[in-house]
Image (spheres, helix red, strand yellow):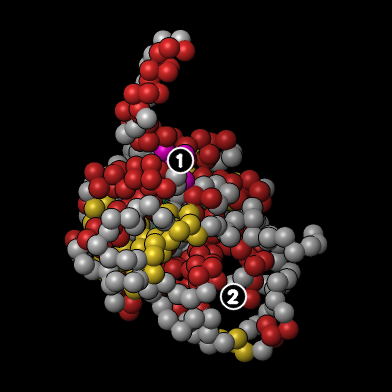
Amino acid sequence: MSGKHYRGLIEHYRDRLPVAPDTRIISLCEGNTPLIPLVNVTKGLQKSVEIYAKFEGLNPTGSFKDRGMTMAVTQAVAEGTRAIICASTGNTSASAAAYAARAGIKCFVLIPEGKIALGKLAQAMIQGSIVIQIKGNFDDGMRIVKDMAHAAPVAIVNSINPYRLQGQKTAAFEIVDALGRAPDYHCIPVGNAGNISAYWTGFSEYAAVKPATKSCAFCDDTCRYERPAVTDSRPIMVGYQAAGSAPFIAGHPVENPETVATAIRIGNPQSWDLAWAAVNESGGWFDALTDEEILAAQKLLAEREGVFCEPASAISVAGLLRDIERGKIRDGAVITCTLTGHGLKDPDTAIKQSQGNVLQIEAESAAVKRAILDHL
Ligand code: AN7
């Protein structure tokens, strides 16, 4: 393929990723997602801050998982793997299925029965993965998948696969590239804790001087020389969990995690130490939000900003707005929030909390006119 159109995050950030020059890239042109300024939710706040949403719901399968999956599946194929496997609360399975389909390999996904959002299940199914519904939660699935690494010829593509985090760190690169600087704070939902770890890696790599090893299609001559740090700072990392699934706030894994934000219904996060390192090294914190707070933020973003993300994603904005009110965010700060997945993933939850916006009336102009006048 020729030309300079965007060809996915591996091609774009090739010199910062562990990919050999002749490797066959498995890509759906993921990444390059918009950094949307939030213009309405900031009105009425005590502090003057700039908030940007990194809308990862606009990746090819509707979540940030595609960033890691392009790397993990590219590597799996390079190693001659013929099947991949993951445990998932939904988005990982949707993404794994898509990249496996693209690569022409088999995909097995373990999901908690009855506890994944409808859109994600539809994706995993139609993209041809073998869906294994287990009578257990994500943590049970993760334990079984780790067993399978030794028991069956399959490659694990959960975020314990280090290539996943390598791909996901590019979201931090994109944020700095878009802002022209690092944000002061970065707010992010935390489930299995891979993403917060990946962002910290990305922000840290961009703040460090590094010799360039390879050049990409977009680089100019300077690429061959030692690369200066792109930014001189790193953000304070803030991770938010659902109150019913908050091991980082409890300080230990929790059994039987529960939350309406099924994507982050995880009690035993695999990237425990990396996530703590991100928060501690950056001077950040973890906090928990109730399901009510999560859903209110999802609705606020949709109604006030026109940005429809899934409940787990909205927790980053829910937490940020609460922390601004509590005085934990400094005046004048530039803040980025990751909205990890698209709202269309979970239509049931969206419909359930928006019933009031539907009117049922006769099919007559007079009735419609009345309805309009009543609601102006
Ligand atoms: C929308 O799909 O773990 O802290 O199996 O789907 O990196 O786990 C999903 C996680 C946040 C949490 N937002 O990210 C899975 C899965 C959304 C998610 C997270 C997930 P991590």
- Pinpoint residue 343: horizontal percent, then vertical percent: 44, 42
241 vs 335, left or right, is left
Specify whether residue 69 is in view.
no
**Which residue is the site of mark 1?**
345
Q: What residue type is labelled 1?
A: Lys
258 vs 220, left or right, is left
Give the image quarter of residue 128: top right
Specify whether residue 331 is in view.
yes
The kind of secondary structure element at disc 2 is helix
Answer yes or no: disc 1 within 8 Å of ligand 1. Answer: yes
Residue at image position (47%, 13%) is: 365
Front in this rendered view, residue 203 or 274: 203
Residue at image position (34%, 32%) is: 354
Mark sitting on residue 16: 2
Residue at image position (30%, 43%) is: 295
- Pinpoint residue 210: horizontal percent, then vertical percent: 56, 86
Counting other residues with Cα less than 10 Å from the Cα at mark 1, is it few (<14), some (14-19), or many (20 or more)?
many
Q: Which residue lies furthest to the right in this view?
A: 2
Residue at image position (70%, 66%) is: 23
Look at the picture and state if 342 lies above or below 198: above
**Which residues, given as a range, are shown in magenta?**
342-346
Counting other residues with Cα less than 10 Å from the Cα at mark 2, is it few (<14), some (14-19), or many (20 or more)?
many
Mark sitting on residue 42: none
Magenta stretch containing residue 190, yes or no?
A: no
- Pinpoint residue 223: horizontal percent, then vertical percent: 68, 83
375 vs 181, left or right, is left
- Pinpoint residue 127: horizontal percent, then vertical percent: 59, 40
Q: Distance between the residues labelled 1 and 2?
A: 31 Å
**In what quadrant of the picture does the C terminus appear?**
top left
**In what quadrant of the picture does the N terminus appear?**
bottom right
The kind of secondary structure element at disc 1 is helix
